[in-house]
């Protein structure tokens, strides 16, 4: 038997598909994940109830989801902006770490009223991230060095610098643990009343709005979009790709740097080695899913925050291996990416019996 | 052999190849005899390369048949073509610079090493078969390559790494690759494009020697003097169709030019007299490089006056694309100056050119003209969005931009757009894309318009619209540079015509003083630049040929140093 698969680019995406596909694919991923849960004698319905419904019905759950989503929103935007300009910022991780180091250092070492101190910390974190973003951005803009490689590799340098800081110059607190001193309370992010989550989410949303407006409503956004779509035509139209490339990476670095600081000043309270649970890389998927606009990035980040928190709850509640939780998360991502593909391509599958190659008339028939 | 008389070694009959929207080969026939050098002549886009890619198994044909040495063959990959005895030397070499000549030549054609496989008494069967499977014999092939190189006077050292070789030598390695595989038919795709005149004449000697030894050679070119000099017979293609196959000796370069360029439908254009105004753009002694870093523009001077269309005629690849790009600031200039309205814009950013009132219709609309994934509105406004009209406070006024797009769409009759904001420009048809670009570049009322092939690849209706629009702009006092490979277009539209050849202006004339044949001859390097009577004496052709490409050893020695 021969199976002939044929992909045709869609002229137009049907409306039901555009909206329905995300929902449908998440359900499909959960269905596949259920098989694994059943083999471990866990009722998938109960498991998913813990993983998703519970998180969204209780205040603690929502607060946790928001706190996990906050760095993802900012880091997601840090990938999204260069992506609009046709560049890949794979180095949000490094920008997160450098932002966290500098922000925390200021928080520990500078004495100022809380409000001023926090602003200083955010500025420092943004500047640190900007530096880490500037390097790959400049190399790309000036000499065409592949930004994927430079931004990725320079991230490892940042992770190592962080490891050195908490073991060396910034090591603090009791014992010889590789952690920094705890941030003074004035340097920690205040909480939002009622939902008991720190104000990081508001900062993240504020920047999402700014990014949305800049990209969708201004000249710069127009130039970023045009350069990202066709750099040659953009140059011919008088746009300056050097400026655009450097700028998007610097802006990305600032956002990711603040993401790092928020994770420390809002959640962890002190610098630790490897404090980021993969925010920088998850941000790539977040940005890909939300590449339409900045608000979609926020939605994607919230969804991934839910996956992270829900996964942890599932682990605790049913003592399922953490690997399984990761499998379910990965399935959701894979299915969503596949859905993106199916949105833009029509797939015909042709089954032909017998050994022979399908003849043209047979394969011309509509798929099964 | 199948047919009597002069037997054909290769016969391609009725070859058809279609691409979306284009028929690249339309029932093309090609017959090549054994031991013959057969020219394949045609303008760019005439279908030469497509035909040869079919013969080499890179494309599958949509119709027709290929008969090689009396046997019908069906080629699905270059490997099959090589096995059938067909070799090809591509314009861009397929060599691995780090490897030696031998390694490059034997790549994909491994022979087991003798020391392991020769039936030594002690060697076990396992070792022997392992040796056969994995060892590479270097000595044997190396000697064979050396032998081949010596036989044809290539002077190539098989142990040298390829990156150390000159371009001409690298080409000979490509030929060695084919000879090593015992091909009977060798395809050369514009082999002289990358060579210096000296290297080219050496290549010609080699080819003649190879042909004498019975190798059939297909020589792709669009340079007439080359076809005249090296080939025995020539097949001419135009617009994907087979025009003629002739004995080269019976033809003058002018005959070939006429067949190659052909006659086309003339449009009725009302070209009124327009008074010429001030010089809008001036270029002095322009020099620029192409993508490969080779000189493409070599000392061009030109002036574009208000109300004037300056036509640039030339076979593509003679520097006109690079020239056009220099004139709008997209390509860096190595030497020379450009002024617009007497302001020096040499090596200024393209934005300065735009602000100074220079518009550009690029040759490749999908590469330089449009961002196909973005909306018609995005694309329509790309030259003007910085203007005050589109700014409201810190924001870009997209509503105004959309209104502007619709003005262009209405005025220039761009069809197939229901919503300029939503429709992707890449979804427009070729003609409408081009009308959108022409409209965008004209509607802003520039002083100078650089139009590179504005009507290429669009349908007849759009061609007419675009030409009329250019003439209307001319009447309004715009200065236009029209680069075109369509000679009728150049003759019908221009006030003055510059013929470019190998990066230089070789001839300046007006439509009244010249005709298509003369221009066709000039732009293919035929005829001398001082040629007065337009007499196409073979001598005239020879002289200029010698200048560009020394044909014999004497010429070679005498001016080898300076060129």
Image (cartoon, grey):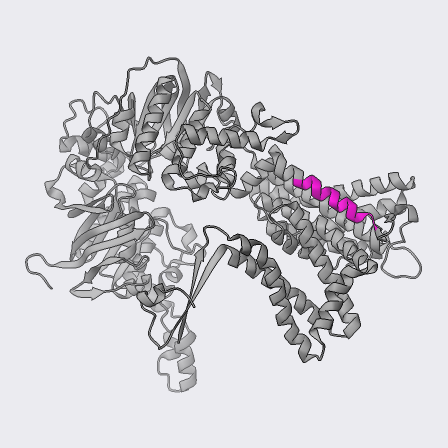
- Left or right of A131? Residue B71 is left
> In which quadrant will I find the N terminus of chain A?
bottom left
Pick whichever, A21 or B534, lies toward us. A21
Q: Is residue A170 left or right of residue B343?
A: right
- Say which of B394 and B29 sits in front: B394
Q: Residue furthest left?
A: B5
Magenta region: A198-212
- Residue at image coords 92%, 61%: A175
Point out the image quarter for the C terminus of chain A: bottom left
Q: Looking at the picture, does residue B107 appear above or below residue B448?
A: below
Judge whether residue B291 can be spotted in this image.
no
**In the picture, residue A277 is in which quadrant?**
bottom right
Kindly identify the residue that appears in the image at 57 percent across and 36 percent down.
Answer: A223
Q: Which residue is the extreme one toward the right?
A: A174
**Does the magenta portion include B376?**
no
Residue B96 in sight here: yes
Tell me where residue B161 appears, x and y as whole percent: 42, 56
Q: Residue at x 74, y 47 (%)?
A: A257
**Residue B480 in the image: above or below residue B368:** above
Q: What predominant SS class does the magenta segment belong to? A: helix
Q: Quadrant of residue B394?
A: top right
Q: Is residue B147 above or below residue B438?
A: below
Is A159 left or right of A141, judged from the image as shown?
right
Residue B194 at x, y percent in the picture: 34, 43
Residue A366: percent from left, percent from top: 39, 64
A199 in magenta: yes
Vertical placement of B464 versus B111: above or below?
Answer: above
User: Could you say which is closer to the camera, residue A316 or residue A112?
Assistant: A316
Q: Position of residue B382 (x, y in %)?
A: 51, 32
């Amino acid at each position: 038997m021969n199976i002939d698969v044929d992909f045709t680019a869609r002229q137009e995406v049907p409306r039901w598909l555009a909206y329905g596909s995300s929902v449908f694919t998440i359900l499909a991923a959960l269905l596949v994940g259920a098989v694994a849960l059943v083999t471990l004698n866990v009722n998938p319905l109960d498991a998913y109830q813990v993983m998703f419904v519970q998180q969204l019905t209780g205040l603690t759950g929502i607060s946790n989801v928001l706190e996990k989503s906050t760095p993802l929103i900012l880091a997601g935007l840090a990938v999204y902006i260069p992506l609009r300009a046709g560049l890949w910022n794979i180095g949000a991780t490094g920008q997160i770490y450098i932002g966290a180091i500098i922000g925390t250092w200021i928080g520990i070492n500078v004495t100022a009223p809380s409000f001023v101190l926090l602003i200083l910390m955010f500025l420092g974190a943004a500047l640190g991230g900007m530096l880490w973003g500037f390097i790959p951005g400049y190399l790309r803009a000036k000499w065409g060095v592949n930004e994927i490689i430079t931004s990725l590799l320079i991230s490892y340098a940042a992770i190592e610098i962080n490891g050195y800081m908490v073991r060396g110059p910034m090591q603090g607190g009791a014992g010889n643990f590789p952690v920094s001193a705890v941030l003074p309370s004035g340097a920690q992010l205040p909480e939002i009343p009622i939902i008991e989550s720190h104000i990081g989410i508001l900062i993240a949303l504020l920047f999402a709005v700014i990014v949305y407006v800049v990209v969708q409503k201004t000249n710069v956004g127009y130039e970023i979009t045009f350069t990202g779509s066709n750099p040659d035509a953009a140059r011919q139209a008088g746009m300056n790709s050097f400026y655009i490339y450097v700028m998007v990476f610097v802006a990305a670095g600032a956002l990711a740097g603040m993401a790092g600081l928020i994770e420390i000043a809002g959640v962890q309270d002190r610098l630790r080695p490897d404090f980021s649970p993969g925010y920088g890389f998850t941000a790539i998927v977040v940005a890909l899913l939300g590449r339409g606009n900045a608000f979609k990035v926020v939605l994607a980040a919230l969804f991934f925050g839910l996956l992270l928190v829900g996964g942890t709850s599932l682990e605790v509640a049913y003592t399922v291996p953490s690997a399984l939780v990761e499998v379910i998360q990965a399935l959701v991502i894979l299915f969503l990416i596949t859905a993106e593909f199916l949105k833009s391509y029509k797939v015909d599958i042709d089954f032909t019996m017998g050994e022979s190659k399908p003849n043209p008339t047979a394969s011309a028939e509509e798929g099964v | 052999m199948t047919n009597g008389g002069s037997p054909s070694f290769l016969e391609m009959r009725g070859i058809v190849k279609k691409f979306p929207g284009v028929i690249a080969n339309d029932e093309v026939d090609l017959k090549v005899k054994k031991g013959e050098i057969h020219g394949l002549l045609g303008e760019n886009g005439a279908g030469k390369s497509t035909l040869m890619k079919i013969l080499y198994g890179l494309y599958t044909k949509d119709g027709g048949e290929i008969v090689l040495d009396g046997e019908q063959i069906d080629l699905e990959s270059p490997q099959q073509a090589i096995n059938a005895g067909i070799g090809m030397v591509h314009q861009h070499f397929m060599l691995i610079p780090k490897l030696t000549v031998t390694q490059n030549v034997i790549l994909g054609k491994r022979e087991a090493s003798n020391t392991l496989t020769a039936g030594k008494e002690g060697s076990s069967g396992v070792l022997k078969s392992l040796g056969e499977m994995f060892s590479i014999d270097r000595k044997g092939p190396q000697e064979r390559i050396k032998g081949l190189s010596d036989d044809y006077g290539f002077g190539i050292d098989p142990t040298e790494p390829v990156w150390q070789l000159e371009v001409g030598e690298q080409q000979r390695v490509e030929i060695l690759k084919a000879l090593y595989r015992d091909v009977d038919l060798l395809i050369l795709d514009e082999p002289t494009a990358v060579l210096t005149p000296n290297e080219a004449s050496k290549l010609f000697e080699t080819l003649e020697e190879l042909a004498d030894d019975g190798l059939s050679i297909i020589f792709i070119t669009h340079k007439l003097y080359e076809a005249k000099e090296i080939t025995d017979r020539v097949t001419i293609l135009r617009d994907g169709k087979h025009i003629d196959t002739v004995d080269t000796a019976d033809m003058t370069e002018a005959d070939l030019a006429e067949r190659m360029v052909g006659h086309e439908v003339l449009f009725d254009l009302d070209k009124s007299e327009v008074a010429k105004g001030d010089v809008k753009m001036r270029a002095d002694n322009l020099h620029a490089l192409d993508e490969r870093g080779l000189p493409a523009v070599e000392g061009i001077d030109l002036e574009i006056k208000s109300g004037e269309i300056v036509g640039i005629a030339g076979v593509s690849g003679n520097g006109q694309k690079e020239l056009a790009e220099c004139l709008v600031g997209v390509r860096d200039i190595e030497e020379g100056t450009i002024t617009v309205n007497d302001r020096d814009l040499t090596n200024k950013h393209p934005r300065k050119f735009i602000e100074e009132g220079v518009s550009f219709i690029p040759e490749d609309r999908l590469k330089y003209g449009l961002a196909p994934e973005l909306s018609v509105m995005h694309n329509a406004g790309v030259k003007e969005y910085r203007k005050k009209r589109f700014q409201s406070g810190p924001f870009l006024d997209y509503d105004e931009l959309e209104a502007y797009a619709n003005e262009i769409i209405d005025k220039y009759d761009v069809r197939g757009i229901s919503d300029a904001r939503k429709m992707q420009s890449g979804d427009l048809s070729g003609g409408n894309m081009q009308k959108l670009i022409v409209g965008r570049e004209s509607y802003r009322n520039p002083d100078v318009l650089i139009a590179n092939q504005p009507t290429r690849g669009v349908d007849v209706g759009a061609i007419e619209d675009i030409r009329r629009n250019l003439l209307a702009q001319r009447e309004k006092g715009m200065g236009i540079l029209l680069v075109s490979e369509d000679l009728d277009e150049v003759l019908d539209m221009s006030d003055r015509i510059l013929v470019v050849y190998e990066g230089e202006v070789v001839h300046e004339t007006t439509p009244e003083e010249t005709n298509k044949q003369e221009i066709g001859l000039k732009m293919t390097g035929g005829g001398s630049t001082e040629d007065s009577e337009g007499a196409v004496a073979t001598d005239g052709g020879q002289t200029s040929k010698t200048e560009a490409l020394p044909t014999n050893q004497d010429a070679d020695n005498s001016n080898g140093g300076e060129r």
